[in-house]
Amino acid sequence: MRLCSWFSAAFEVALPSICLNCDDPLPAGDPGFCMRCWDRLTPVTDPTCPRCGSSTDVRNQSCLSCVSHPPCHSGLVVWGEYGGELRNAIIALKHHTHDELAEPLAQRLCDRILAEHWDPSPEFVTAVPSHPLYRLRRGYSASELVATAIARRLCLPSCQALSRRDLGRQARRSRAQRTAMAGKAFGRRRAARKLNGRSVLLIDDVTTTGTTMHRASRSLLQAGAGSVYCAALARTPDSRRMQ
Ligand SMILES: [Zn+2]
Ligand SMILES: [Zn+2]
């Protein structure tokens, strides 16, 4: 064990755990948040479009945008709005190496996915890949951790089928260059051969405009997936879905 790891382990034993959200003492074995803070996380309950996940007036009815221009993915669900305790939990998971939060967050998203009764039901789980530099800095990918936990709960195989290409500084590129590179945002890993006509569940942590999910779905379909369903832990409140 390296010296810094030894000190870290020693501090964990010496100091009581505290809730990452409210600093209250945490019972041994509780993951990250106290029960009171977990209870403050609330799911989206308003009607949403089953194709793109945006808010609609009528439950289970596709929005006008999806009717006129159907997205390439067959469905998209989000668990909650990106704010409050859910935002704090996702930031702690993504940026502060609290990987213990992946399982309780995955449990919530898994319940949302099961309520959707997709047909054909997903047969394979994968995640929107993180950029290699982010992964190197954090030591893991938050979306992959959540995808693995969901696959375990659904008793489905999982692996990373896509890779993220380095797109560099987008601000320095012209609009035409950015549009041309958008189609190359994701590469294909050897594991993509396993897709082979299967119905794939694609997991991400946060979705903003839906653009990343859309591009990753298209890459999975080009790699041989039969259909793609998307699920994210949270959406930004002012999300605009890309069609
Ligand atoms: Zn708390
Ligand atoms: Zn829609």
Image (spheres, grey):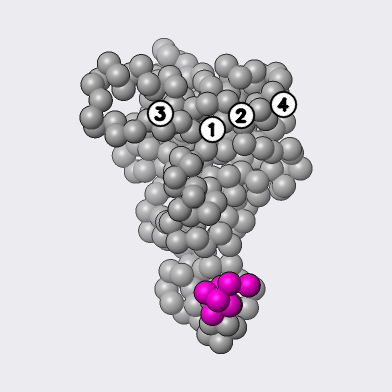
* Of marks 2 and 4, the one in the foreground: 2
Query: Which residues are the magenta region?
Result: 1-7
Q: Is residue 134 left or right of residue 155?
A: left
Q: Position of residue 223 (x, y in %)?
A: 61, 19
Q: Is residue 10 left or right of residue 178?
A: right
Quadrant placement of the N terminus: bottom right
Of pointers 3 and 4, the one earlier in the residue sequence: 4
Of pointers 2 and 4, the one earlier in the residue sequence: 2
Disc 1 to disc 2: CB gap under 8 Å: yes
Q: Secondary structure at mark 1?
A: strand
The local crowd at label 4, few if under 14, some if 14 to 19, many if 20 or more residues have their Cα within 10 Å, is some
Of residues 69 and 221, which is closer to you in this image?
221
Q: CA distance from mark 3 to mark 4?
A: 25 Å
Pointer 4: what residue? 194
Of residues 161 and 31, which is closer to you in this image?
161
Q: CA distance from mark 1 to mark 3?
A: 16 Å
The local crowd at label 1, few if under 14, some if 14 to 19, many if 20 or more residues have their Cα within 10 Å, is some
Q: CA distance from mark 2 to mark 4?
A: 10 Å
Pointer 2: what residue? 189
* Of marks 1 and 3, the one in the foreground: 1
Pointer 1: what residue? 163
Q: Quadrant of residue 192?
A: top right
Query: What's the residue at 52%, 74% (across, down)?
Result: 4
Q: CA distance from mark 1 to mark 4?
A: 15 Å
Q: Quadrant of residue 6?
A: bottom right
Pointer 3: what residue? 211
Q: Secondary structure at mark 3?
A: helix
Of pointers 2 and 3, the one earlier in the residue sequence: 2
